[in-house]
């Protein structure tokens, strides 16, 4: 569990850099107009780097306290936002 937690946290830290760039360019979603779809996608895109930052801090605190299972779970939490973003891109054409 200890090694898996370290690997997941390193991958999340590496993924933080592209997610910040994605969040910086997310206001361009509004070029086609502000709709419910764009606001939902914008909030999901911005929430990914924020969630990575917060969960990594909490995960490393838990890791150094010796709670490796919770550290692994906390490190995997940003995947929820990535899955939601993928689902929203698939079904968002019906939103206006």
Image (tube, helix red, strand yellow):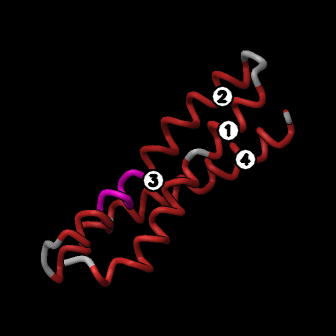
Is disc 1 surrounded by few (<14), some (14 to 19) or many (20+) residues within 10 Å? some
Residue marked by disc 2: 60
Q: Quadrant of the N terminus?
A: top right
Q: Residue 12 placed where, x, y %?
A: 63, 50
Badge 1 marks a residue whose secondary structure is: helix
Say which of marks 4 and 1 sits in front. Answer: 1
**Which one is nearer the viewer's eye here, 89 or 11?**
89
Mark 2 Cα-neighbour bin, 10 Å: few <14, some 14–19, many ≥20:
many
Q: CA distance from mark 3 to mark 2?
A: 18 Å
Is 1 on the left-hand or right-hand side of 52?
Answer: right
Mark nearer the N terminus (1 vs 2) = 2
Residue 8: image tag: 4
CB atoms of marks 4 and 3 within 8 Å: no
> N-terminal of the two: label 1 or label 3?
3
Query: CB atoms at circles 1 and 3 under 8 Å apart?
Result: no
- Bin the neighbour count of mark 3 within 10 Å (Cα to Cα): few under 14, some 14-19, many 20 and up: many
Image disc number at residue 88: none
- Residue 73 to residue 21: above or below: above
- Residue at 37%, 58% (x, y): give it: 44
Report the residue marked by disc 1. 73
Report the mark closest to the observer, 1 or 3.
1
Is residue 42 found left or right of 83 in the rendered image? left
Residue at 49% across, 71% down = 86
Q: Is residue 78 magenta?
A: no
Q: CA distance from mark 1 to mark 3?
A: 16 Å
Q: Quadrant of the C terminus?
A: bottom left
In which quadrant of the rendered view does residue 34 lie?
A: bottom left
Q: Which residues are magenta?
A: 42-48
């Amino acid at each position: 569990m200890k090694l898996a937690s370290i690997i997941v946290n390193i991958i999340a830290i590496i993924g933080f850099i592209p997610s910040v760039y994605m969040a910086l360019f997310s206001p361009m979603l509004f070029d086609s107009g502000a709709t419910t779809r764009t606001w939902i996608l914008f909030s999901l895109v911005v929430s990914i780097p924020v969630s990575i930052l917060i969960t990594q801090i909490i995960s490393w605190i838990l890791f150094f306290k010796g709670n490796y299972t919770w550290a692994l779970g906390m490190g995997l939490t940003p995947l929820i936002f990535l899955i939601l973003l993928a689902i929203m891109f698939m079904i968002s054409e019906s939103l206006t």
